[in-house]
Amino acid sequence: MTTRLPAQPNEVIDRSKPLAFTWNGKKMRGFEGDTITSAILANGEHIISRSMKYHRPRGVLTADFWDPNTSVQVGDEPNVRASHRALVAGMAVSAQNVWPSLKYDAKAANGLVGRFLTAGFYYKTFMKPAKMWPAYERVLARFAPGGKVDLDTPHGYHDKRYAHPDVVVAGGGPSGLAAAVEAARAGASVMLVEHEHDLGGHLRWGSNDDADALAGLVAEAESAGVEILTNSTVTGRYEDNWLAIAQRNHPIAVERLIKARAKVLVVAPGLIERPYVFAGNDLPGVMTSGAVRRLIAMYAIRPGNRAVVLTANESGDAAIDELERAGIEIVKVIDARTGATVTKASGSKSRVKAVTCSDGSIVDADLLVTATGWTAPTSLLNMSGDRPVYDPASARFFADSPPDNVLTTGGIAGDGNRDELISHGRSTGRLAAARAGVARHRIQAATTRATAVDGPEPAYPDDTRSPLGRDPHPELFRSTSHGMVDFSEDISSKDLFGAAAEGFDSVELLKRFTTATMGPSQGKLETVNTVAVLAEARGETLAEVGTTVWRPPYAPIALGALAGRVFEPVRVSSIQPWHEANGSTPILAGQWVRPEHYGAPQQEVRNTRANVGITDVTPLGKLDLQGPDVAKLLSQLYTNKWMQLAIGSVRYGIMCAEDGVVLDDGVTGRLGDEHYLMTTTSSGAGGVWNWIENWLQTEHPEWQVHVTPVTTGLTSINVAGPNSRELMSRLVGDDIDLDPDAFKYMQVRTGTIAGVADCVVWRIGFTGELSFEIHVPSGHGLHVWETLLGQGESLGVAPFGLEAQRIMRLEKGHFIVGQDTDGLSKAPTTGMIGLLKFDKDDWAGKPEVAWALEGDYPRIVAIQPTDPSIVPDEACQILREGTKDIVGRITSSRFSPTLDRAVCLGQVTPEFAGPDTTLTVQLVNGEQITARVMQHHAHFDPEGERLRG
Amino acid sequence: MLLVPCPNCGPRNASDMSYGGEPHSRPDPNTASPEQWRTYLYLRDNESGWITEKWYCSSGCRKHFKLERHTLTGELRNPPLPGNKTGGHK
Amino acid sequence: MGKHKSPARYSAAGLAWRGLRNKSWPRVWREPELKSAYDVVVIGGGIHGLATAYYLASNHAITNVAVVDKAYLGSGGSGRNTAIVRSNYLTPEGVAFYDRSLDLYNTMSTDLNINVMFSERGHMTLAHTDSALRTMNWRAEVNKLQGIDSSVIAPDEIKKLSPSLDTSPNTRYPILGALYHPPGGTIRHDAVVWGYARAADAYGVDLHQKTEVLDILCEGGAGPNGKGAGGKVTGVRTNRGDIHAPVVVNCTAGWASTIASMAGVRLPITTHPLQAAVTEPVKTFLPTVIVSGSLHVYVSQTDRGELVFGASVDPVANYDMKGTLEFTEELAGHVLELMPGLSKMRLMRQWAGLCDMTPDYSPVMGPTPVDGFLVDVGWGTYGFKAGPVSGEQMAACIAHESMPDLIAPFVLSRFTDGTLVGEKGAAAVGH
């Protein structure tokens, strides 16, 4: 029975602050400062979970973050690490991997058949009958460990922070603390990140002198200006010391991701105590020496009544003292340094009762403490590209050659007494600060514009620290019996021997076959024992077997913290408030939200064709091009000619990539001698800008062109319909002459509209109507829009949305890049053969377009279903009659209110592209219809009389 | 994340940049054979080791520039950057 | 030539018998001596290489075959992918090819006598924009014509199949529909590696791990040392010695260009890392595979309860597999867009594999300008799905010295002919 001890000198619990919580529905009380498990232990319960495969009862093993069988459900949060998580008043804590209850678990029957459930057993069975596998799979899935996700969990508030510290110290034990202090004193900005709730590492459960030394270091750190983050973990080290820090102690954010670009990283995580492998090593009551020292010193927990201690090091020896001081009977000490060991722990299902020693003696005990060695948590070193090396004399791994901006100190670097560790930490801090200084200098000097660099670069400081020693330690991994190696995956040393004998005898294959080290502690406790057992099975050394690579994150991190505040804003035009207030249905188009329609798109089409309509086309990409060489640039990018474009004219062009595939299209107008405005498709705006810069900077740096993206700087409105000129005349200033002879189709004018100066207007005809496209400085967009509506009332003006636009352009047979073309459509597919100017010296994609013209490229054609009332879905396939051979597809399809029939565009092979060819179109429901290829792309007004009017 | 040294903006997170890949010289479009042109379009050295590559400071100054990077270790040289004694960095 | 030896058959009865007698299983494959000559040397001990060797032996009685790998079997993409299979591709040639692969996966557990745990749980590709929905419709229509079970379903049906998805219309990326492909699912990828390895070994194929190819030996070619166009292959040089072979097959995914350059062959490939990550396990709640092209994410839940995530390839060409923080941030953000209730789940591990990306999102298979040097590369993000059929077809290609119809579209020469495959029209995420 575990109980609370009298007050301990350095305990972290506050007995004046009791906290009520429930454990599996049972009411319990702990104290502020308790972890969940220390509180449960204080209430006399010691089984925290059932194991994954065999459902064996499990308790506290390490009493820290990595405690493998202490994950619990807390409210809607699964997999809470109960030996780390601080107790909070009102917590509803329950065991996770149990059915029907923690005490009486029906699946424990698996333990009886364990000899058949060897690692990887599922690969060898359930194959027949094949149709039964889904049923087997459902049963296996029921054994999935872990807690339960509540799908209604709200997305908590998680912000993120960016930091640019000179030095980050990962680990706040004596060495890490000392490193932080000295680095800060040397003038570096320092973040000290401690995984646990308090600084100090093993000093927290040491002597009173240790406690005093710790208090002194903490005071030094505070006065030196070190930023201290406790209950926070450096979870990842990425290229160039780009660090992920999970901060779990933030007052508002449950968990916060800090992204820090550190100039130097000091890795000081201490050491993780390694469990020992022997029969019964997973029984509750078997603990590491660190666990009992923590439980007694920090939480005043009596971990048992009669203890056997297996010790191979100082930590085990100290645990003996601690147990004695707490009044716990030591029934036997086994000193592993003399070659003695434990061979078996046996007991009831729920607790150790007896320990068998290697001398054959059997001792009654309810607590078995093991101190058999250390695992160096080399995770951050692995992530730095280092491959740590095993030292058999010390029975643990050490860094090999980390990068110069990653330093180690503390237990991961070597052994020493308190003063030696602190001294090493201090010299590490000084080195870190000095190297950070050089990095700072180099960053300042790195740009061509650097002006204020302080003097010459300082000499790069060499590592002149006196290294920590390495204490000898016996190689103790497994006793003479088989026991658990991976406590979270239920993998025993016997499983590993079996797998190795089967041929899964390299460490990676073994890991994959057995799943050892793949569970929630990700090898922190298991990796070295796994490697050691494999080495034993192969008759090799650990160094020969090698180890696995520890991957990020060092400690698990919440998806919410990684996601942060999801910040993906949409773009809207300056007229959007009007659209929303006037019944528009919004549609998401790329990054933009725009009106799809205002209730009746077919009516919007009819009104535009009969009277006048206005539509918001702001998402059109717009680039302002200025300079003496713009025409050369345009000639290079578009397939057609641009050198002779007159001031005041606009021209349509198609752009190809170098493989001849259509990249974008749009109109560009010449506003002045060296001033052009280019429009692109909405989704292509960013890409075209990059494409232009690429040509200007890498192929033709001699060309003088200045590019300014003005997509959102200009609000764009298309005014279309037979009454559009009359409407425009009511808005334009004296500086724009709308007379058809003065302002012709495909011309551009700049001037005043609705009192707004510096507007650009061009006459183009995407809708097929007489139309004017206005580009207004965005601050005045809404004003111009409302003025158009007000002035046009008597002319029948009405807004139209994207859907009406699409219908009208389809009626006119205008293709859309990316919809009617695809990733393989070369320029000839568009049918715009006249725009392909091969007598021009060079343009992007020219050779491929020329070769494509010689071949069987697919054609875009206008298509009308024979039955005018059937509108095939876009993407319907066009087949060779009587076969399933695909000869094309419908790319655009709508019912045309103007023609009162279905109209389509499609891509077909040349054989089917001729006018009046009858096509077979398969509808989505499988039915086949016939359709006719039209003479012109335009279903409506093929001569273009309306738009030239 | 890699720190990429833009000649104008200094070392910046790679996420501020666009990657341009191996530079390859463009054949004369009027005389290139299909094989030459498609070698330019498609074939790549794709070396595991030191390569010269193009970057574009797309969230900064919009400068196109080249640098040398080791595709196995992530080290940069020409220009070198802050981390290590040798001026290379990882 | 029959089977070299019969491996101990896997069965429930075998498990029970060995369990009772405390008897371990025999070695899953031999550790053979490296011979100085083979009829065929396959470079790369992943699914593609092992399947090629297996089908050479089983379908064509060519058993004097070595598979060499610089590390351990399945150490590359085969063990790093997210184990998703499907055949709902965009082009008829893609559909036919991947559907054959799915057929082979369907009978693999019994064919190879190892449970590969094919979980035919259905595969959903979400559409968040009308243009994405149009692409889904396009794929569905092509799929239906090829006899593939694939259709576009509406949000209410999506919600029924996967209740954890947020199908409300007011999200930043509303779910407008999905391409649903019931035969898609997941498979235990390592088991596929081991299954082919064990079966190939049983036919007498020699599997050589930790055997790194340092050079490819050629004669008669235009380049230095007889390499390059017009030459022929004579063998490989490894860290364990030279191996003579008239046929050498490059099945090395991410390292495809490096190996090909040893024969003087340049490929239309750049190597990019593809990252993946896994959460801590929770009780199963996600019954289908979910893919979102617009959000660059795919997710499934293993029988162990972990969520397995993947994304699109990293933009920067790299052979480094360390992974990035940004990947996990974007991934988590996008997963929570789709399933907001998962914010308290924790990411447990991230890793990366190498993808050999081609310009048309389709592989490069078959002969090269160097006689006897064949490639099975350019697998991008879809190599796992294609493993069985690639092995089967590459074996046929080697045995008959001609390109089988099923893989004819994927020949290397298409990049000089300009006859690229149309898969590029599909969504950006290949899963």
Image (cartoon, rainbow, N blue to C red):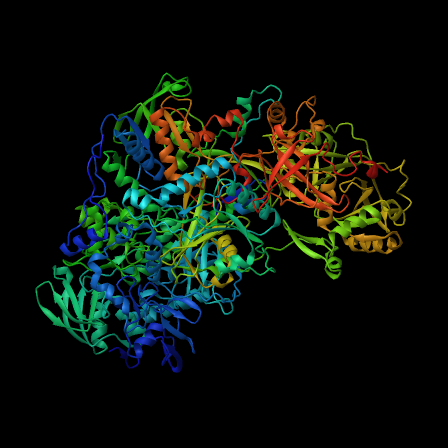
In the displayed structure, C260 sits above or below A666; it is: above
From the viewer's perspective, tell me whether residue C302 is left or right of residue A705.
Answer: left
Q: Residue at x 28, y 46 (%)?
A: C114
Tell me the quadrant of the picture where the N terminus of chain C can be found: top left
In the displayed structure, A757 sits above or below A3; it is: above
* Rendering coords of residue C62 (x, y %): 28, 29
* Rendering coords of residue A859 (x, y %): 64, 31
Which one is nearer the viewer's eye here, A730 or A900?
A: A900
Number of marks in picture: 0
Which one is nearer the viewer's eye here, A111 or B30?
A: A111
In this view of the protein, can residue C181 be seen by the observer? yes
Residue C208 placement: quadrant:
top left
* Rendering coords of residue C141 (x, y %): 55, 43
From the viewer's perspective, tell me whether residue A938 is left or right of residue A459.
Answer: right
For this orientation, the residue located farthest to the bottom is A16
From the viewer's perspective, tell me whether residue A531 is left or right of residue A760.
Answer: left
Residue A317 placement: quadrant:
bottom left
In the displayed structure, C312 sits above or below A335; it is: above
Q: Residue at x 24, y 61 (%)?
A: A275
Which one is nearer the viewer's eye here, C85 or C146?
A: C146
* Rendering coords of residue A749 (x, y %): 84, 40
In this view of the protein, can residue A392 be seen by the observer? no
Which one is nearer the viewer's eye here, A800 or A33?
A: A800
For this orientation, the residue located farthest to the left is A360
